[in-house]
Amino acid sequence: MCDLARDMNPAIRVVEKTDFLDDLGDRVIREIIERGKE
């Protein structure tokens, strides 16, 4: 069980980073759209 958890940790970290980057990208795109409207 310990080995499995250790093996899965990097994958979980990658998924968290991907979610974070997606969120950041969405925010940047929204910011650009808002500025484009002005």
Image (cartoon, grey):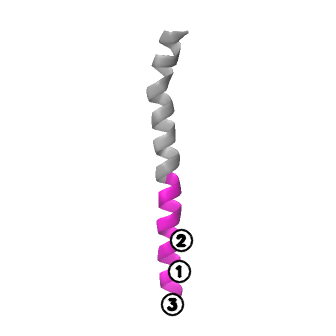
Which residue range is magenta in the image?
Answer: 22-38
Q: Position of residue 19 (x, y in %)?
A: 53, 47
Task: Using a 10 Å C-alpha cutoff, classify the residue at mark 2 as few (fewer than 14 neighbours), some (14 to 19) or many (20 or more).
Answer: few
Label annotation for residue 38: 3
Rendering coords of residue 3 (x, y %): 48, 10
Which type of secondary structure does the marked residue at label 1 adopt?
Answer: helix
How much space separates mark 2 and mark 1, taking CA atoms? 6 Å
The residue at 48%/58% (across/down) is 24
Element under label 2?
helix
Would you say residue 29 sits in the magenta stretch? yes
Give the mark nearer the N terminus: 2 vs 3.
Answer: 2
In the depicted structure, whether residue 6 falls above or below residue 11: above
- The residue that disc 1 covers is 34
Q: Which corner quadrant holds the N terminus?
A: top right
Tag shown at residue 20: none
Q: Amino acid at mark 1?
A: Glu
What secondary structure do most residues of the magenta stretch adopt? helix
Q: Tell me if residue 33 is in the magenta stretch.
A: yes
Q: Could you tell me which residue is drawn at 49 percent across and 84 percent down?
A: 36
Q: Residue at x 48, y 44 (%)?
A: 18
Q: Are marks 2 and 1 in contact (CB under 8 Å)?
A: yes
Query: Crowdedness of circle 3 by 10 Å Cα count: few (<14), some, many (20+)?
Result: few
The numbered disc on residue 30 is 2
The percent position of residue 6, horizontal first and vertical second, equals 46, 18
What residue type is disc 3 on?
Glu
Cα gap from disc 3 to disc 1, whole angstroms: 7 Å
